[in-house]
Image: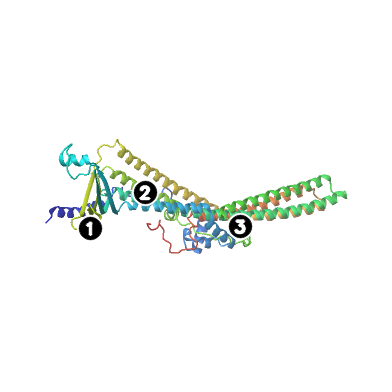
Amino acid sequence: MNYRLVRLGGAVPVMLMIAACTLEPRYQRPALPVQQTWPDGAALQARDEDTRAAVPAAAADIGWREFFTDPALQKLIEIALVNNRDARIAAINVAAARAQYQIQRASLFPDIAATGTETAERVPASVISAEEGGHGATIPGINPNGTVIRYFSASLGLTSYEVDLFGRMRSLNHEKLEQYFGYQQTQRSAVISLVAEVANAYLTVLADQALLALTQDTYDSQKASYELTRQTYERDISTRLDLRQAETSVDTAQANLALYTRQLAQDKNALVLLLGAPIPADLPHSAIDDEHILEDIPAGLPSDLLVRRPDVLAAENDLIAANASIGAARAAFFPSITLTGNIGTASGELSGLFKDGSKSWTFEPTISLPIFAGGSNVANLKLAKVQKELYVAQYEQTIQTAFREVADALIGRGTLDDQLRAQAALQDATQDSYALSDLRFRNGIDNYLTVLESQRSMYAAQQNVISLKLARLQNLVTLYKALGGGWQEHTNTSATTGAGAAP
């Protein structure tokens, strides 16, 4: 019995058991660095309870088609997801991270290669003479020009395979895997941001169109009023001051008309950039006053952000990757074993390559024990620990930022509706005031200054109503994005969270 083989066979399971371990610290998720509830407020709580009852799915699981119910907006989001360059860059980064992980993962397995070689060597006659008969000796039958030696071999070899006794390679593989997951989540964040940006740009265009239409109506009304004032001035019923005041209102409306025309064109250009393609000519018509552009959503709990928001998940993936790098840095202090070898056949003639007696093999195990590295291993370990602390801080900062974004959006949702109702009531009051002041001017009771002030107040109130409608809708978009919504096209009531499967 070959006792060496017996001892080797008994050592293999032990080596495999050691290789299954790593020196990574046990990962523990940092404590939530924010309070456990959203900001208090009776209006906020009541609103969220009503929304939760109406929408059973979590906000992050609501598909953008179910949240953005406007057909025109759905069409624009479709176009952007296909053509937007930022979305393409995010997808390419994921593909690159996946390739890097697969490259690192391949190091866990031995490289086995089949090779076939022919070696030809010319040996001078003087060398052969020296070896056979001594220096300067002449041996009969030796070609004075030397001899050509040919050597053929075929083998199956193992190339520099590192036995991962202390988990260094496994830790590096784990690090790359978590980085790949992080890029996946970053791609999701890019898609969520793109969907929200397209929605906000589209809503801005709708608001621009409403402001432009309001300004056009105001201009037409003021121009008609100016013509009427001019006629009364020519009949000496009104004064020149009244005429000039009426003229200023027309000029103001005309200047605003140019302003909103330019603003609408520029905001459409911004939307085109997000789409990565022209705005379709057959886009369904919508208006900022439409009731069913967006749906409402529940807020959930702050802890939901840990498993719902892709940027939080990406930050945790980076943290876990940094934790794995500590294991790799620790393993550098321990010996490493590298195996190199091959088995095959060798012959001086090609025809004898696979004959009996041509078998050949080599086996070269190498053990490397770090003794002196100038402090690089210690420095690498310190760096890995410092980087982990950095990622802990970034992870906590990401959560705090997410908490604030959701809290701000909830506050906006709880107050913008009340503000919009109050502003609408103010708009109605200014419209009545303008109508009454204009009537009093036409009857000679008041001067035109009163009409002008009433008209300015009414126009400002109408503009504020449109601006508040835009702010309310964009705040809902922000809340949807802040809660992690926008990644899925359709609502998934049985959605599972996480980075996904390893490639």
Give SS at disc 3.
Answer: loop
Per the rendering, the mark at residue 279 is 3
Give SS at disc 1.
Answer: loop
The residue labelled by disc 2 is 321
- Relative to 361, is 3 on the left or the right? left
Q: Nearer the viewer, mark 1 or mark 2?
A: 1
Give SS at disc 2.
Answer: helix
Q: Nearer the viewer, mark 2 or mark 3?
A: 3
- Relative to 494, is 237 on the left or the right? right
The residue labelled by disc 1 is 354
Q: Position of residue 273 (x, y in %)?
A: 58, 52
Amino acid type of the residue tagged 2 in the rendering: Ala
Q: Earlier in the sequence, mark 1 or mark 3?
A: 3
Q: Taking 240 as reference, is 115 above or below it?
A: below
Amino acid type of the residue tagged 1 in the rendering: Phe
The one of 471 and 188 positioned closer to us in this rendering: 188
Number of residues whose C-alpha sits closer than 10 Å to that of mark 3, classed few (under 14), some (14–19) or many (20 or more): some
The one of 216 and 31 positioned closer to us in this rendering: 216
Q: Position of residue 205 (x, y in %)?
A: 62, 54
Point 85% across, 51% down: residue: 232
Cα distance between the residues tagged 1 and 2: 50 Å
Mark 1 and 2 residues: CB-CB less than 8 Å, in contact? no
Q: Residue furthest front?
A: 140
